[in-house]
Amino acid sequence: MILSRIREIDIFSYYCPSFKELGVKFCSELREDNSPSVSIIIWQNRLLYKDFGYPEHSFDCFSYVMKRYNCSFYDALRIIDNDFGLNLSSFKNTVGFTMGFKATTTAKKVQHKRVVIIRKRSRPWMKKDAEFWSKYFISKKTLIKFGVCPITHFWINENRFSCNLSYAYRIGKKYKIYSPYEDTKWISNTTRRHVQGYIQLPSRHSICVVTSSLKDVMSLYELGIPAIALQSEMQMPAEALVHELQERFGVIALFYDNDFDNVNNPGQTMANKIIREFPNFVNIVLPEQYGVKDLSDYIAKYNSTDLINALVLEALISETKKGKETTEQESTERDSEDLQGDQVPF
């Protein structure tokens, strides 16, 4: 609602006076910063505040206000509403304007450019990498097979980002940067056509699992289960991809997040939508009672793969049995038709 009245750049310009131009570095107002280390850039068609000298400070316009005033998301919305005089809320701030004057829109323009990660700086594998990935039963050998490498820096166009614990996923000629402990976990220049785990698939197998992330794909690979992940759980798989998977694999199973603590449960909502479009898919759901949303988090929490193996095996057996029953029924119907045909006189 707020962004239908004002722009992200208006919000940054008001609450971050040192910000003058997109891509131009300035000194942080959230910490002591003697040399310009912050830049506001365009990332995935949104504005992103990034402190190159303090990687934890990575914010969109709303989380920046939350950080600046140490407030909740809802309170940040109320502050912005009051300062810009939008009158979207019944709440009125009797203290006045947070910056001492009423906010106005800026003349600054946002020229959207296609985000391209032009290079990365790799580093050697370290103990901290083993500690992170081993929680999911993922080995260094598997990480290398799937094009994952640890990095110290990456660049989006001319902007450099430092990393504490980050990894570059190589998918075709594109990159997806994964920073598990930062507010902005994902940055990529991939498209809908880049299917994670696709080139690592075997030519044939009894099952292929479509799951939520490359991490899940690699956890399943360690169990001998072929899997892929689209770029987003909200993405509908392309018909050409589905047709190819059905030609190569006996059963196609979805294993999406079970967002049980979200009334909309987006992971399972999308899984059901996909199955309506492709009825031959089977849906594997992680039971809510385990208190985790995805399969790799289950492995990390319980230090076990038993349930994951059991759920996939159950889906395979169920669908194989269903397919056999369908084949037998079709065969019986054909035999009945043949018998009736023999009884028709010439």
Image (spheres, rainbow, N blue to C red):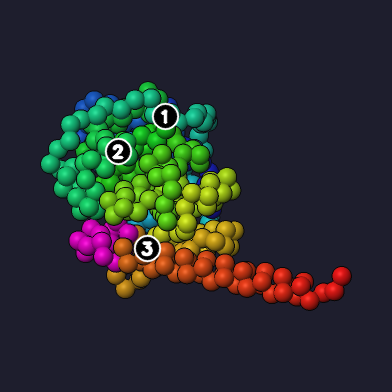
| 18 on left or right of 134 | right
Q: Do tag 3 and tag 1 residues touch (Cβ < 8 Å)?
A: no
Measured Cα–Cα span from mark 3 to mark 1: 32 Å
Q: Quadrant of residue 116?
A: top left
Mark toward the start of the polypeptide (2 vs 1): 2
Q: Residue at x 47, y 56 (%)?
A: 250
Mark toward the start of the polypeptide (3 vs 2): 2
Q: Residue at x 57, y 62 (%)?
A: 279
Q: Is residue 117 magenta?
A: no
Identify whether 246 is placed above or below 104: below
Which residues lie in the magenta part? 295-308
Q: Quadrant of residue 28?
A: top left
Q: Which residue is mark 3?
A: 312
Q: Residues within 10 Å of mark 2 (few under 14, many from 20)?
A: few
Q: Residues within 10 Å of mark 3 (few under 14, many from 20)?
A: many
- Find numbered disc 3 in the image and state the secondary structure of the residue it sits on: helix
| 225 on left or right of 92 | left
Residue farthest along the top direction in this orientation: 158
Q: Which residue is mark 1?
A: 173
Front position in the image: 158 or 8: 158
Main secondary structure of the magenta stretch = helix
Q: Which residue is mark 2?
A: 145
